[in-house]
Image (cartoon, grey):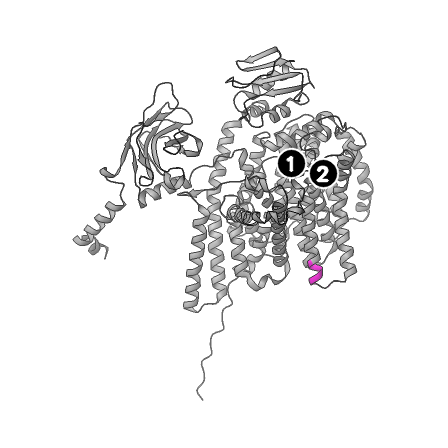
Amino acid sequence: MIDLLKLLSALLWPTFIGWVVVSLIVGKTKLLSSLEKLALSFLLGCGMLSLLMLLLGVCRISLTWPNIVLASALLLAAPLYLAVKQRVLTLGPWQLAPGTWTLTELILLSLITLRSAFVLFENLIKPVIGVDAFANWSLRAKVFFIQNSLVLDPQSSFLLGGGAKFYPIHLPLLESWVFSVLGYWNDALVKIVFFAFFVALVTLFYGAVRRSAPRIVALLGTYLLTTLPLLVHHAAIEYADLPLAIYFGTATLLLLNYCEADDDRYLWLSAILAGIGAWTKNEGFALVLVNLLILALFYFRSKKEPLFALQHLAGYFVIALLFKAPWSIINYVYRIPPNEFQKIHWEQIITNLYRLPVIAQYFYQKLLFYGNWNIAWFALVVVVLLAGKRLKDGRGFYSLFGIGLFLAMIAFMYYLTENYRWLLDGTTLNRNILLIMPLVVYFIAVNLPGLLAAAPVPAPKQPKRKK
Amino acid sequence: LCYNFLVKPKVLLLLAIIISICSPSSAWDQINVQFTQQPGTPYFVGQPEINIDAEEFTTLVLRIKAAQGGGARLYWATNFDPQMNQTKSLAFDLSRSNDFKEYTFNLRKQNGYWAGFVGQLLLVPENGPAGIELGPTQVIPGNFWTGFKSGWREFLVFEVPVPRTVNFIYGPKINGLSVNTYLYWLIILGSAGIAAYTYYKKLPWQTAARNIMIVTLICWGALDLRQLLDQGRTVALDWQTYGGKSLEEKQAATCLGDLYGFLKFAAANIPTGEGFNFVHPPQYYYFSEKANYYLYPTHYDQNGRYVLVYDPNRTEKVPSGKLLATHKEGEYILIK
């Protein structure tokens, strides 16, 4: 029981940090529902707390929970004061649109709850099982917890926690925070974090679809998201792929809100989440580029003033960079060698032409004929074919552009980097595709209202009067 | 109408011919396999040099009575590859039954290595041969009905989550083809039908688009029900493996064999924080990483003072050193 309370505290503290920041950004507007605000607060708070732990570690301050709480309270004091003074520290409306629930809606809600229960069970019933978790993610969490530090001795094989040192330590630090609050190392209970990530994704996804679709479609879309087998599997293991997918996915969804509502607050929230994504995994920084290109296209199509567009694009990039920069500086100072597999070989641009058909074939096979994504990719094609002209603008257009851009980006990665070998042995393609899946389902969901609407009934023909 | 159709002798004759074509093969079109189980062996083996032409005889019909359920794997040797190995094998679930239960497999479709001439069959029940009885087993050319039965069984096979699952999930198959393929064809043909109907009835195209989308969503939901089945089985399996256990017991359950017990033994015998080298058979992936993870701050170091040897079958070359402590045969610690 005490452990349960400790676990709850371990989740609530970052959520509180995030809540203060989100409240300050959102202000008194009803931009987000209460549940969305909570989910967003959790995601933001986790990123900020782990970044704070990184800074404490660099300053050689012991990473114990009283130190972390004290440091975050000190840093939070000013924003908290501002938020209280401005009276923005609220949760917001509890429902985006109240009303009675139909049977179909209740069934969909039950199915989503069932999946969430499955994720919770799978996380808590077993300890760490993922091979990369043993070698990297969870190992580093244990090292940080036991040493109460980042291990900054360059001679130590456990420098920065050991493992694959070039990977950012957002997730290991977050896990070591949970161990600190628990007071002991328990690699089964710590997985509550992954359940919380999954719930945050589901909540924010529902809210995003709900903005442009009736409740039943938003529930249907959310249910479809929870039917993706590989996504659900990743929600119950200790890898960083799903947290990155959540940060990137929600950042993009908020960006799409911005494109439609033209409210800067969505943009800055999106930039922060994209930055935390870059602090979760190195690939995250390339995903910031995807969002920047979506934003650039939006400004181009909406004929915004170039100066305005440049300011906002630069602002987005700088905010995202702020979250990535500390880790990059530490990598530079401690001369952490980069991941050789991610080095781009421009000199092979011609000689690698043979890879193109192989990459295309792997995309075709893994996306459509494996059990990873149900029939989501086929449904995407169906929606594109059926929606036709409706895709010319709005959320549908920009999300489809983002999906295309993402696919092109990972195809490029396999074409010009040594990651190609991980494509051939089936290791990474689907884990990369996982990053874009929330957006794929979102694209399908936001097009559903138009596609499922009944055809207008033609007016009955008037009988011609005889002259 | 039904009555007239059935009582007409010519129609009855035609039906009889169709049924005989579709029915499991006649006596002259089947090869009988006799499985035997030698005492002390964990498997059932078929008679040697049976020489089944895999091109013609595509389907295996097993009859099994099992006192308890569990997994099983069927292996075969061919003239191309006379060894029994995982590549030429098929995993399936055994159901608990008091009578002989029929298991039909279209091996040609489910595994491309059912090819050439098959010399021998081998059946390995996961929980050992105790309580399992094999009835008459035939290899037959197969027909629509056996194809259906085999496909249905394959569709329901549980894809147990393994470490590789983090990279990809195969998904359910029917006769060797991904279920997705069938669903795509269903949607495509359904869409063509809907489009034709819409055109013929001069209905608005919006209605056709709506119906096509509904068909797609129904297929999506149907495949999800199948996925839910596997998730339910995963819950049952994990509850069986980890339910009601302490954290240490759970951690032990994630390790193969007696690795966790040996690591605990090592933790008690090596001073905390020391480095150790780890010798184990190379096919035991990630043993060093697990040792590093569980023993930290005692840690893996190739030049470490201590050498952990986990080699139950004693196949590995062990570096020289003084024996510090022995856990079990083939599991010991050396000090340099």
Tell me where residue A219 appears, x and y as whole percent: 56, 50
Q: How far apart are labels 2 and 1 at the CA level?
A: 11 Å
- Majority SS type along the magenta span: helix
Q: Residue furthest bottom?
A: A467
Query: What's the amino acid at mark 1?
Result: Val
Say which of B258 and A12 sits in front: B258
Q: Earlier in the sequence, mark 2 or mark 1?
A: 2
Say which of A67 and A274 sits in front: A274
Q: Are marks 2 and 1 on the same chain?
A: yes
User: Secondary structure beneath disc 2?
Assistant: helix
Q: Residue at label 1?
A: A193
Q: Which residues are magenta?
A: A297-303
Q: Split into 4 quadrants, where in the image is the C terminus of chain A?
A: bottom left
Q: Residues within 10 Å of mark 1 (few under 14, many from 20)?
A: many
Pointer 2 chain:
A
Q: Is residue B159 above or below residue A64?
A: below
Tell me where residue A96 appears, x and y as whole percent: 64, 53
Q: Is residue A64 above or below residue A206?
A: above
Tell me where residue A63 appears, x and y as whole percent: 76, 29
Say which of B90 and A342 sits in front: A342
Do we see residue A38 in this rendering? Answer: no
Do we see residue B57 in this rendering? Answer: yes
Query: What's the amino acid at mark 2?
Result: Pro
Say which of B221 and A371 sits in front: A371
Q: What residue sits 72% from the left and 64% below the top?
A: A303
Q: Which mark is residue B135?
A: none
Q: Residue at label 2?
A: A14
> Quadrant of the rendered structure where residue A184 is?
top right
